Amino acid sequence: QLVESGGGLVQAGGSLRLSCATSGFTLDLYAIGWFRQVPGKEREGVSCINNELRSTDYTDSVKGRFTISRDGVESTVYLQMNSLKPEDTALYYCAVGLPFTPCALIPERYDSWGQGTQVTVSS
């Protein structure tokens, strides 16, 4: 199970930290991804983090602004979002990667999804 939290309304230039609380599986065995979606558009991969090596990937539009991390003790994955822009407005989801599948910003590589948390950035 995945439960996202931390979304909200923020002014441009502000920050939010999203959390993805996981349960029912061993977090350290799987890649975790963050995705976002706005109405009428396809789901977009934002960031992901691998399990053992903790290597990460980011879509170009968030590089240098967003940071993904994972806490195995708390079974939680975080997405720190700084310097937010209005174009970051979306419903943000976290997802668990398919078994033995490395981190990738491709929705088809993920198995289970949370319900999402809304991020709205005002100009």
Image (cartoon, rainbow, N blue to C red):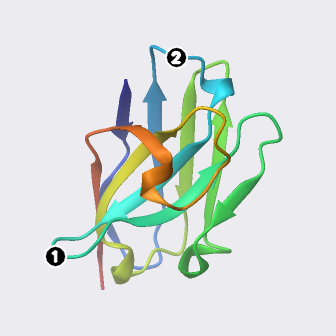
Instruction: Report the side of 77 relative to 19 (left or right).
Output: right
Quarter containing the N terminus: top left
- Residue drawn at 38 percent across, 74 percent down: 88
Label 2 crowd (10 A; few <14 / some 14-19 / many >=20):
few
Q: Nearer the viewer, residue 83 or 90?
A: 90
- How many angstroms separate mark 2 from mark 1 (CA)? 32 Å
Judging by the rendered image, the residue that carries numbered circle 1 is 40
- Secondary structure under tag 2 reads loop
Q: Height in image: 45 above or below 101?
A: below
Number of the label disc, if any, that sits on residue 25: 2
Asked if residue 9 shows in the view, the reply is no
> For the residue carrying disc 1, how many other residues have a C-alpha within 10 Å: few (<14), some (14-19), or many (20+)?
few
Q: Which of the 4 image quadrants contains residue 41? A: bottom left
Q: Amino acid at mark 2?
A: Phe
Q: Secondary structure at mark 1?
A: loop
Instruction: Tell me which amino acid carries mark 1.
Output: Gly
Residue at the (52%, 49%) spot, across then down: 33
Q: Position of residue 42 (x, y in %)?
A: 29, 71
